[in-house]
Amino acid sequence: MRTQEKFRENTDEQAAVFGALADPTRLKLVKLLCRQHDPDALCVNAVAGLLGVTQSAVSQHLRVLRAIGLVKGERRGYHIHYFVNQDMLERCRKLTSAALSIEEPSEEPSCQEYCPERREEDVSSP
């Protein structure tokens, strides 16, 4: 796989995950929901109380997390209870791990091919 293609692979999806988790309150919300089990999903009121934020703030954070598929909601009576989508959680783990992994140096083109200053240095070196 060419270098440019490799860097582009999953980049938009990885950026969406990092963006969604970049807010400290959203990250706390995800951690809170990860501790819940399916029958113990939480409604907005409960999440707001546990995190110490307003219900409208919780709703906005849940909107972002639902947009990437990390959180799902299920209507139970008059309220919607939220829980972590376990399949997407695993996908997020893989995406973040891949984005932050250290790979072995490759035989692909180096800076010398792309940087005019480096090419001039190599030509002038004895």
Image: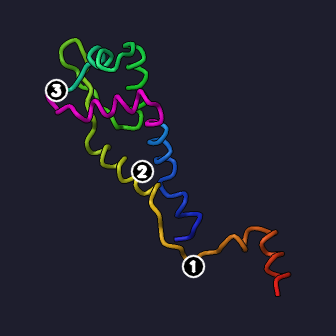
- Residue 42 is left or right of residue 110, and the answer is left
- Residue 86 painted magenta: no
- Circle 2 Cα neighbour tier, 10 Å, few/some/many (<14 / 14–19 / ≥20): some
Vertical comparison of 118 with 126: above or below: above
Q: Nearer the viewer, residue 47 or 60?
A: 47
Span highlighted in magenta in the image: 20-39
77 on left or right of 100: left
* Residue kind at label 2, given as amino acid type: Thr
**Residue that numbered label 2 is attached to:** 96
> Is 72 drawn above or below residue 54 in the view shown?
below
SS for callout 1: loop
Left or right: 66, with 78 as reference point: right
The alpha-carbon separation of the residues under discs 2 and 1 comes to: 25 Å
Q: Earlier in the sequence, mark 3 or mark 2?
A: 3
Query: Which x, y percent locates residue 8?
Result: 54, 57
Q: Which numbered marker is on residue 40? A: 3
How far separated are the C-alphas under marks 3 and 2? 27 Å
Total marks drawn? Answer: 3
Q: Which residue is mark 1?
A: 107
Give the dominant element type of the magenta stretch: helix, strand or loop.
helix
Residue type at the position of mark 3: Asp
Alpha carbon distance from label 1 to label 3: 51 Å
Q: Percent position (x, y) of residue 12?
A: 51, 47
Q: Secondary structure at mark 3?
A: helix
Identify the element where label 2 is drawn.
helix
Horizontal and vertical percent position of residue 62: 38, 26
* Residue at the image point whose x is 35% and y is 49% from the top: 93
- Of the two numbered discs 1 and 3 on the same chain, state the one appearing first in sequence: 3
Give amino acid for label 1. Answer: Glu
